[in-house]
Amino acid sequence: MLKQKRLTLVITVLFTISILLSCYFLFTQHPLDSDDPRQEKFLAYLPHSGLSNQRIELANALLLAALLKRTLVIPPAFLGNVVGWMPMDQLLDHLSWLTTPKDFDLICQPPTPGDLHSYVQRNKCAEYHQFAAIPWTQLHDFSMLEPYVKMKFVDTVSFTKLQEDLNVHDNDTFIHYDDHLYDWRLYEDIEEANAILRNGSNFVDSFTDRKFYKIFTPVHWQQRPERLLHLGGIFGSTRMNMVKPEHIQLQQLISSTLHYRLDTPLGETVAGIVQHLGGKASFNAVHFRLRDVPFRKYATENLHQFERNMSIATGTPVPPLPPYNEFGVLTSIPKPPPPPEQTIHLLPQHNLSLPPWSNVCENVSPDFSVSMENVGSRAVVYIATDHRDIRGENSRLLEWFDYFPCTLTLNDIPPELLDPLDKMHCMYNPNKSLKSFLIPLVDAMVAAHARRIFTTPRSTFSKYIAELNEAWVLKEQGYTTSSFFLY
């Protein structure tokens, strides 16, 4: 087993080196910089929705900019409640008002009776109060990508200002207007693209309906002669479909670049909480999304799946799996473990090394060669969730604590451990703290430091947290997410 882990580590290191060398060779043969700045070409896009969706957009944009050999114009990362996809002109209107410098504290005071204008501003100000922004460079280190794609970070989302800053005119600008969120996909394999069009499978089934998308190949964008190519939103983890090994490797490099930095006040906060829990890989975790409608619908089913998987990981017996049908699919949903005969009601105290917590709860070994199966329900578990009060009497998740009483959430963490976040402020208003906006990131990043983490199905954010866990924990001991089977 030890030899196998070492071999896996060696393969991982060699693979990473091959990615860097392949990408470096490919893209340094075609210089990114133009000798004449007037000939430099740009790619711009519009971010929307939550930070996880924005990160997926950024990843797609970075890859496309590299393929097109254009400088990517990158807006800030937006936190809080960010407007979802909408037609370009509407989205530009929202983002331009929020990102154009102004005295927000003065403008967004309570409305004045008799002053109609103060009421007109009220809706925009409501949006502002739920919104904040941070440079992407405070979240990710882009230095590994600099040889392969040129980036221009901007503070303001404004089409007019962008043209002025780039010295680009309307006759040298091409704008693509999306018809809907999933407007197009890019396929590098022309045969695959044609096959999809022939059988009419160019659609995506979202949580709400079916949308058909256009199919483009790289040449569709490469043939645009304009200096500024402005796209709408480019969200979608299946938006960019590469087949050339060097492009797949670049895609993987972009993915690893967009892992959160840990050398920031945000990372300092996470490190303090992880240490409070017992240290990296000394606890298990669940990333449980509940607030949005699609996840609320499957909350009970997901809860039972988490209960079952955590029980198996920690050595608690569970009912056998139902039989598979002829297509290799389970004929019914696996049952959760039976409720424990005796339950323990335990609230985490400030110091987890003291009784009664220390008498009942046990950290798992951070060494993956040491089994967790003897720990059982006493294992320390961290739940990252968007549920406001998971312990509340009306919570649908209360039964979880019957199975795993040694569970903590961010609400159980000493508040002083969040103090490093006080150093971070909105880039548009230094009086606006980012603390409350960064809580979901802290929550998820803490969970990503677990030995085992179980994540919410069909959540792109949960999938990303699993990627962080693989990068920060699993690969250090020669494992990947595929090393573990979910039941």
Image: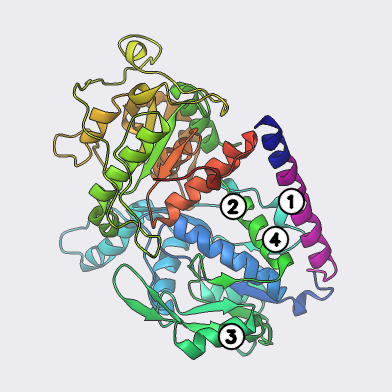
How far apart are the two marked residues, 3 and 4, measured between alpha carbons? 29 Å
The amino acid type of the residue labelled 1 equals: Phe
Query: Are the two marked residues, 2 and 3, in contact with CB atoms closer than 8 angstroms?
Result: no
Residue 380 visible at all: yes
Query: Mark on residue 15?
Result: 1
How far apart are the two marked residues, 2 and 1, measured between alpha carbons? 18 Å
How far apart are the two marked residues, 2 and 3, measured between alpha carbons? 28 Å
The amino acid type of the residue labelled 4 equals: Gln
- Residue at 35% x, 33% y: name it: 311
Q: Secondary structure at mark 3?
A: strand
Q: Secondary structure at mark 1?
A: helix
Work out whether mark 1 precedes mark 3 in sequence or the reverse, and give the earlier one. Answer: 1
Q: Quadrant of residue 1?
A: top right
Badge 2 local density, few (<14 within 10 Å), some, or many (20+)? many
How far apart are the two marked residues, 4 and 1, measured between alpha carbons? 9 Å
- In the image, residue 270 lies at what x, y percent? 49, 33
Q: Secondary structure at mark 2?
A: loop
- In the picture of the structure, the residue carrying the numbered disc 3 is 174
- In the image, residue 12 lies at what x, y percent? 70, 45
Query: Are the two marked residues, 2 and 1, in contact with CB atoms closer than 8 angstroms?
Result: no
- In the picture of the structure, the residue carrying the numbered disc 4 is 249
Work out whether mark 2 precedes mark 1 in sequence or the reverse, and give the earlier one. Answer: 1
Query: What segment carries the magenta color?
Result: 10-32
- Residue at 79% x, 60% y: name it: 22
Q: Quadrant of residue 167?
A: bottom right
- In the picture of the structure, the residue carrying the numbered disc 2 is 258
- In the image, residue 451 lies at what x, y percent? 50, 32
Residue 261 visible at all: no
Query: Are the two marked residues, 3 and 4, in contact with CB atoms closer than 8 angstroms?
Result: no
